[in-house]
Image: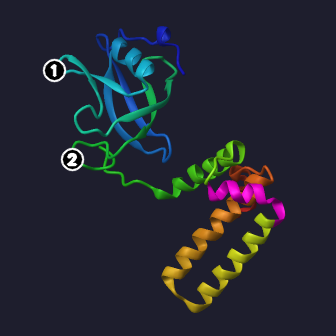
Amino acid sequence: MIDQNKIDFTKLNGLIPAVVIDNTTQQVLMIGFMNKEALDKTIETKLVTFFSRTRNNLWVKGETSGNFLELVDIVTDCDNDSVLVYANPKGNTCHTGSYSCFGYEKDELFFLNDLFELIKKRKTELPEGSYTTSLFKSGADRIIQKVGEEAIETVIAAKNRNRTDVINEVSDFIYHLFVMLAEQDIELKEIAANLSKRHRK
């Protein structure tokens, strides 16, 4: 998290631009302005808070709609006069009802990373009643066996060319593959890096 005392609020008469980014999808959600009080409150409450130039007061994003922006991190630019705010949106961000004020649609591909992080968390915490927990407790051989079973079921669904079955079986396969990677302490980004290294333009 940034050091609030290093932020330069002098250039815009006590305000700084704050660009909000979805921490999961990395897409731009909105831009607002913060004064020092709004920045301090954002960091203190973990709810993104702006300064309204029209109403001349602080406002918490989502205070009327319930679509809060839960703070993850804040970084400043090289001049310390603007910030990127990484947040987890609770609902759509734009007042029009859209995901982003800039017309972006939410990219669900980024959920895969969230899923992998959740699986790693299950491995560490082993909460009761979780299917993922039961897999980790069953051991590596059972996890690997499940990957094989799901791979075969995916092939069968693809051979039958049933779109719904293919989607469901691939989803099961990817989930169990993620569990296997987590069990062997292999990060998803290692796979991505390897694929990138192999890629030939």
What is the secondary structure assignment of the residue under circle 1?
A: loop
Locate residue 28, reporting x and y percent.
Answer: 40, 42
- The residue that appears at 24% across and 49% down in the rendered structure is 97
Location of the C terminus (image quadrant): bottom right
- Depth check, front residue: 87 or 129: 129
What is the secondary structure assignment of the residue under circle 2?
A: loop
For residue 135, which quarter of the picture?
Answer: bottom right
Q: Can residue 197 be seen in this view?
A: no
Point out the tag, 2 or 1, that comes first from the N-terminus: 1
Magenta-highlighted stretch: main secondary structure?
helix
- The residue that appears at 38% across and 17% down in the rendered structure is 41
- Which residue position is annotated with label 2? 96
Locate residue 126, reporting x and y percent.
Answer: 68, 47
Say left or right for 75 vs 68: right
Locate residue 185, reporting x and y percent.
Answer: 78, 49
Q: Is residue 134 visible?
A: yes
Up/down of 49 relative to 134, above or below: above
Q: In the rendered structure, find residue 55 and report the number of the disc placed on it.
A: 1
The residue type indicated by label 2 comes to Thr
- The residue that appears at 31% across and 40% down in the rendered structure is 67
Say left or right for 37 vs 127: left
Up/down of 126 relative to 39, above or below: below
Locate residue 1, reporting x and y percent.
Answer: 54, 22
Q: Where are the magenta residues, as a range?
A: 130-141
